[in-house]
Amino acid sequence: MGVFSRRMGWSALAVTAAAAALAVHPAAAQLQFSTADGGTSLKLGVLGQLQAQDIDTPDGKDSAKDLYFRRLRLVGQFKYGDKLSVYFDTDSPNLGKGNADGTKNVNTSIYIQDFVVTYTFAHEFQLDGGEILLAQSYNHNTSSAQLMPLDFGPFTFTETGAIQGNVGRDYGAQARGYLGSDHLEYRLGIFQGDRGKNEVNAFRYAGRLSLWVFGAQTGLFYRGTSLGQIQSMEIGGSFDRQKQYSAYTGDFFWDQPVGNGDGVTLQFDYTKWDGGTFIPIPKQNTILAEAGYYLGAIKTQPFFQYSRENFDRHSSPDQKRTTFGLGFFPRGHNSDVKFAYTRLQGTGQVSRNQYQLQYQIFIW
């Protein structure tokens, strides 16, 4: 009876979410202000991700159930001429989600998630300053509104807590540019990192080189999938260092339209982490692999995500996550529904199941 009730509940939620995705017409609701000559403009948008989740408890004897906002953001971009722009967004993540002690996350405070001022001296040389999402890997720098699965890889932001970041963000400045007819992208920045007692620590340095075989992406963020619309192929490498801490990444992304409006999306990220004696990140490597095939005729995309966290010297239990899912995109990323099943496994731990359903609205 419990299994039957769970299936009926998920079916009702899925039908409701799909109906909402079909009904919403977000493109008509965009809000933009500009001067008469168009030289100055302000664009505002919204990202909302309502999510249902059912995940086995760590002992595998029961399941935790939630219905909450995974992300709830106000998004904006201000442009002054063709040189100066400001991108910003706020967030109140996991709003309404239950906690292990039986309470609920009802913190209604909204904070600044990203705030990046960009001055474009030339296409080949731009300066970004503010609270910046580091391009530590392709997945690390992907827009959360354009992901193929429901979320980032579970080990993509391994450094965040240890180095006192904000979900991959840090305060600082970076140079960014595109060379060789946009085939080569570089990013090089200096950031706060962990300041330490009396704020005496050396700063954090991070950089990235990307070879765009074709279809370069020249914005602040990368996309997770174009849903069969744009051809892109990227091979990249990144570094992130502060004192004894280091992270080195190699990644690959391929987004390929296929005939009749279909598309294939592939991504692979490999990162070596070492906190040294500076921050509590044991030596380890993490792997993320994603694959999806978009069916244009029915606006649907089956997807697969595999993540692994392998520790050196068995300092902690190795972890593995395997996800199979299905996305329905009647309005592209502006209004979509995704369902995912994940198998969570860890060395010496009980294997667990996770079911997630997400409805996204993105007005931008």
Image: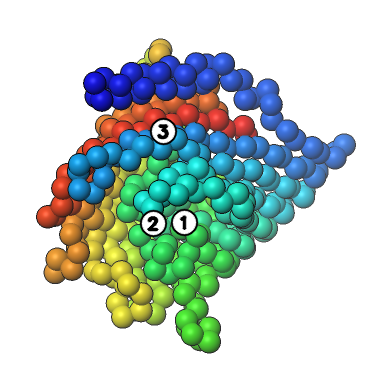
**12 or 26: nearer the viewer:** 12
Residue 201: x and y in percent read 47, 83
* Residue highlighted by disc 1: 167
Whole-angstrom CA distance, mark 2 to mark 1, is 6 Å
SS of the residue at dot 1? loop
* Residue highlighted by disc 3: 52
Query: Cβ–Cβ below 8 Å for labels 2 and 1?
Result: yes
Query: In percent of the image, x 75 and y 42: which residue is there?
Result: 42
Q: Nearer the viewer, mark 3 or mark 1?
A: 3
Residue 28: x and y in percent read 68, 22
**Is residue 31 in view?**
yes
Q: The C terminus is located in which quarter? A: top right
Q: The N terminus is located in which quarter? A: top left
SS of the residue at dot 2? loop
**254 or 272: nearer the viewer:** 272
Q: Say the numbered circle drawn on residue 157.
A: 2
- The disc labelled 2 sits on which kind of residue? Phe
Query: In percent of the image, x 49 and y 85: which residue is there?
Result: 197
